[in-house]
Image (cartoon, rainbow, N blue to C red):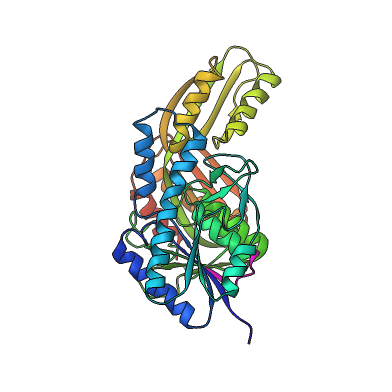
Amino acid sequence: MDTVTVVLKFGGSSVADNIKLNFVAEKIKEFYNNKQRVVAVVSAQGKTTDNLIKEASTLSNMPNEREMDVLLSTGEQMSMAKLSILLNRDNIPAISLTGWQAGIITNNTNQDAVIEYIDTTRIEKELDKGKVVIVAGFQGINEEGDITTLGRGGSDTTAVAIAAKIKANHCYIYSDVDGVYTTDPNQVTIARKIDSLSYKEMLDISDEGAKVLHNRCVEVGEKFGVPIIAKSTFKEGNGTEINDKPIEGTVIKNIVKNDKLIYVHGIAVDYSAQIFNNIYNKFVETEIGVKNLINNSENYLDISFTIAKDKFSKFANLLETELPDLECTYRDITRISIIGNGIMSNNSVLKKIMKILDEEKKEVLSIEVTESKISIMFKEIISNDILQKLHEILIK
């Protein structure tokens, strides 16, 4: 009988305090005592990362990004060491490894690094000794030997990437919710759990701002065929499985409402293709995450785009230091995305959406339709009422 290898990832809410850490340790023991090889990837405890960011902001309005990575990586290291202490106390042999000890090599982008390679020699060696290997999520090391972090939610990507490399049988993503829901259950009471999603559907959900799985972890899962199961740490149940099996026909799986976006309108008198390309290159180089970029004029620079609110300080710094001639105005907006396989080919879905928008008399900035998604940008932040109505009409 082949040995089963699993990767378990526990989010910040799962390891928020020592009581919950003990609960996580018990869950790991269940797998270990069932003769399975276990790699556990952990996030920082509770609000540790947020608190570290706040502390840094009291020292500098624009902290050095390399030093921020050094600082933020300590949260996960605390979690891994404490969990290892608990397991060893209970005679479960365990060892904690930082991202670099686990062989996670990234590019040089601080705060939002991408994993380029994982040398799993140390992980495999410790597994062969019969140990539970606990890895600090969200972090790695670049070619300069500097600590890097993978961006918020990056521990998911750490877990799936390790699972792909060691050919794990499953990768379980544990959190305080018991799976992926048809929409945010905190916003719509009739939301219900989804049993399974395709990688494409899950990627659309993550890209639209749902805080369920890190979008890059889904990309890695799809590329290497890693079965991902999103489950609750504290509640029994099957969770939601993400795999490569989309359902035929049009089935609306999820509706995401994202209020954490800023719509930017920028103008400049001087205009040429070179100026436009230079501005866009600056956006790419600084990895601000500009989306929906449109040039609205042929005669002068008149651009509009959206950015996430958590990227705004970086964008403001770019304007001040490198793009002083770009005059910008801003507004907070809502973007709602309806996600499901084959949605583009079913015109009735768009008709139902437009009927609701007309009844609600909402001003729309844009509507984007792709094979598996319809996204609507509104001119302002809108209430959750429309989310409830869309759910009632579109999700059966």
Report the span colored magenta: 165-171
Percent x, y of residue 345: 62, 56
Marks counted in the figure total: 0
Can residue 234 be seen from the camera position used here? no
Can residue 166 be seen from the camera position used here? yes
The answer to whether residue 377 is above or below residue 131 is above
Residue drawn at x 59%, y 39% is 109
Depth order, front residue of 239/60? 60
Percent x, y of residue 68: 46, 38
The answer to whether residue 296 is above or below residue 224 is above
Residue extending furthest toward the left: 19
Q: Tell me if residue 91 is in the magenta stretch.
A: no
Residue extending furthest toward the top: 269
Residue drawn at x 60%, y 71% is 168
Image quarter where the C terminus lies is bottom left
Percent x, y of residue 215: 54, 52
Q: Quadrant of residue 11?
A: bottom left
Q: Tell me if residue 169 is in the magenta stretch.
A: yes
Image quarter where the N terminus lies is bottom right
Percent x, y of residue 138: 50, 51
Q: In the displayed structure, does residue 136 sit left or right of residue 341?
A: left
Residue drawn at x 54%, y 28% is 304
